[in-house]
Amino acid sequence: MAVPDVELHQDLRSAVGELCRRFPDNYWRDLDRKEAYPDEFVQTLTEAGYLAALIPEQYGGSGLGITEAAIILEEVNRSGGNSAACHAQMYIMGTLLRHGSEAQKRAYLPRIASGELRLQAFGVTEPTTGTDTTQLQTMAVRNGDLYVVNGQKVWISRAEYSDLMLLIARTTPREEVAKKTDGLSVFLVDLRTAVGNGVTIRPLRAMMNHATTEVFFDNLEVPAENRIGEEGRGFRYLLDGLNAERILIAAECVGDGRWFIERAVKYANERVVFNRPIGKNQGVQFPIARAHVNVEAADLMRARAAELFDGGQPCGAEANMAKLLAADASWEAANVALQTFGGFGFAEDYDIERKFRETRLYQVAPISTNLILSYIAEHVLGLPRSF
Amino acid sequence: MKTAVCIKQVVTRDWPLRPAESATWVRDDDASFEMNEPDAYALEEALRLKERHGGEVVVCSAGPARISQVIREALARGADRAIHVESDALSAAGADAVAAALAAAMQDESFDLVLTGLQSDDQGFGQTGVVLAERLGLPHATIIMEVDIAADGAGLRVKRELESGWFQWVAMPLPALLTIQSGINQLRYATLRGIMAAKRKEIRTVPLDGVASQGQRILELYVPEKTSATRFIDGSAPEAARELVRLLREEARVL
């Protein structure tokens, strides 16, 4: 297994931290109030090349591993920002990289690496099918050199801020395939031309500023050359991108957790009540200490999963465990920070409530905690399938 | 044009400062460090001059092994190579010792221009650049706000910041040394490509020649004691007012 490049990791943390300092708390707070997309931040991070970390050098990226990509996103969240605005630009291209043709890779990857093209929307979830992906209803019917797509997706993040969307749709009806995981295919949809010509995007207002949407397909014509990989094998392509996503989300949670703890410690040291800093009370400091312990423990599992991933080893169990542990730890840290800040934690100006809402998402998305537990129970421990 | 930029690694701004046991420096064994801010502006100015006039930017720094962090950062931002005078004896050294160490390592490079930050965020003496100029036998100008190199490369005009919003333009020959004021330009970010490229750039490590200069050293460092005392000034109002002004001026030194 490769020796971790400690210097590179230190340099990445320091450089991303420096960049993020130019987007302070009030930048994110104002966007949150307006439910606006962090255009300037995303543009800056893109131009500096950080979102192209995972793209191989031959296609214009830096060819780094998931360990380094995770450090970048962790530092964004640790600074008080929110990687969710752009993390998908890092990893959605993985499907294209692993399963696309050489022509597709050459056509798209260098422009994704430079930021000229944003590929940060993934059309999977539908109103009637959540994690039970094989039940999805959106159909893509072959018609000569085209596929004609009809259906609906929901909770599609960043669709309004993406040039391309990766779309999974059924190309063979479920009744006609032996296995329900067969018959699904993956397409690259060019949203720049599709919107208004078969695609309608409707923003969904949510608990936090997440630029999420509903996407409707009405006889959308997708050139057959935009299908990625073989027809009918899309579900497998979807699965093999999930570990990367789990590890990166875990890293963001670790970043959130560290941010909450840093803020809570500072406040507990400074806030004087009854003539002493509130941090002197064990009732205040112990929960912060415990949350810190849990964030650091989750970070170890994240590091282990990333190490396996970068070494080309199976890491499904570790990636899922890292995501669960990190999401739980950041949520615990969020609660502790809110409790430490007391009433002020609820005031927008302190940013605790904003980050509290943001980190809560990771109990639910991109996979809910229960689904991770059922995966561990069934696939790691050999218990009967529970659903 | 061959430009040197001298940079220093300092404790990060938000690090809680506590005197070390020696009482001659702050406790920094577990501190986090960053590039001295005025030096970052000096580096940026050097990179901009290179973009306009071509040439090479060489980063020079003196200190223990840990300072390689800021050297790599400077390389990631675009400097071409680096010289690191490595010695633990320089970890909290004064301006004289640092300037002597840097001068010895830079002497044979024949730089056209040497830039330093105006002062360091930790000691704040503002002397390293000036002493270094003397040791290298270069003319210098301080508190520089703008650098304008003549088209023929023979000399330069620099804008100095004076008190009360006044500025001064000075014409100088090259080679020269300038100490750069913070905020004179917009700092660039280290890009991911820059970080990767920095891994292949040369960092020449040279040992400290002899012992660190002791021409100047810190004898004691302490946190000022906070006191609150009330004093009543007797006498008529005009007399008391005069006495109050005298005390504010001479004792409290706030006027």
Image (cartoon, rainbow, N blue to C red):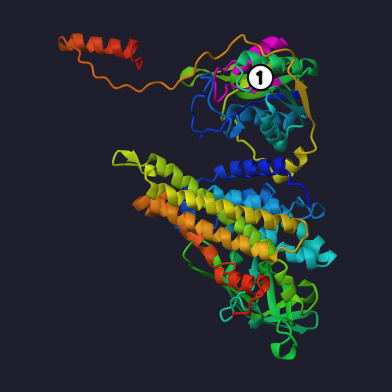
Q: Amino acid at mark 1?
A: Ala
Give the quarter of the figure containing the C terminus of chain B: top left
Counting every numbered tag in the picture gives 1
Residue that carries the numbered disc 1 in the rendered image? B89
Please state which of residues B254 and B175 is positioned toward the viewer in this rendering: B254
Q: Is residue A317 magenta?
A: no
Question: What x and y, as percent, mark residue B231?
Answer: 23, 16
**Above-or-below relation of B243 to B85:** above
Quadrant (top left, top right, bottom left, bottom right) of the N terminus of chain B = top right
| Residue B137 falls left or right of residue A287 | right
The stretch in magenta equals B114-142
Q: Residues within 10 Å of mark 1 (few under 14, many from 20)?
A: some
Q: Is residue A254 left or right of residue A228?
A: left
Task: Identify the residue at image location x=63%, y=44%.
Answer: A13
- The chain holding disc 1 is B
| Element type at mark 1 | helix
Residue B250 place in picture, x, y as percent: 34, 10
Residue A5's x, y, as percent?
Answer: 73, 44
Question: Is the residue A277 above or below the residue B160 in the image?
Answer: below
Residue A152: percent from left, percent from top: 60, 79
- Let me know if residue B122 is in the magenta part: yes
- Residue in the picture at 59% in, 15% down: B127
Q: Residue drawn at (46%, 52%), measured in percent from left and top?
A: A29
- The residue positioned farthest toward the left in the image shown: B236
Q: Is residue B247 visible?
A: yes
A293 to the left or right of B195: left
As drawn, B72 above or below A152? above
Q: State the residue in front, A333 or B11.
A: A333
When asked about the image quadrant of residue A124, the answer is bottom right
Q: Residue A163, can we see it?
A: no
- Most extreme residue toward the bottom is A175
